[in-house]
Image (cartoon, rainbow, N blue to C red):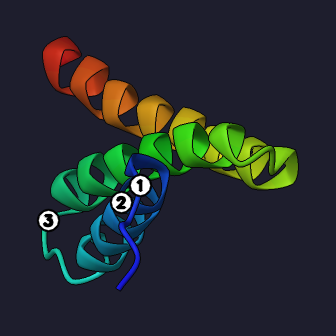
Amino acid sequence: MENINWVECLGYLASVLVAISFIMKSMNKLRFVNMVGAICFVIYAVAINAIPVALINFFTVCINVYYLTRKNVIKQAE
């Protein structure tokens, strides 16, 4: 059995986090876990030189950050 390097482990971790995010009932938890998974995918994609994968996951991170901060701003304004 070959040794799995840190890049592969990061890719597997990212996959697991994104998959787990889809079973969350809370939208905030879903977005947070999905964002962490997407961040892992960005790092993974850059490490393996898969720029299109990095770009779409970076976009996903931005969307999640937007909605997570937007909800908090709205809550604070109330």
Tell me the SS state at disc 2.
Answer: helix
Residue in the image at 36% along x and 67% along y: 3
Q: Which residue is mark 2?
A: 9
Q: Residues within 10 Å of mark 1 (few under 14, many from 20)?
A: few
Vertical placement of residue 34 versus 12, above or below: above
Mark 2 or mark 3, which is nearer to you? 2
Residue in the image at 33% along x and 44% along y: 36
At label 3, the amino acid type is Ser
At label 1, the amino acid type is Asn
Location of residue 14 (image quadrant):
bottom left
* Marks 2 and 1 close (CB-CB < 8 Å): yes
In this picture, residue 28 sits left or right of residue 10? left
At label 2, the amino acid type is Cys
Vertical placement of residue 26 versus 29, above or below: below
Residue 28: which disc? Answer: none
Q: Which residue is mark 1?
A: 5
In this picture, residue 9 sits left or right of residue 59? left
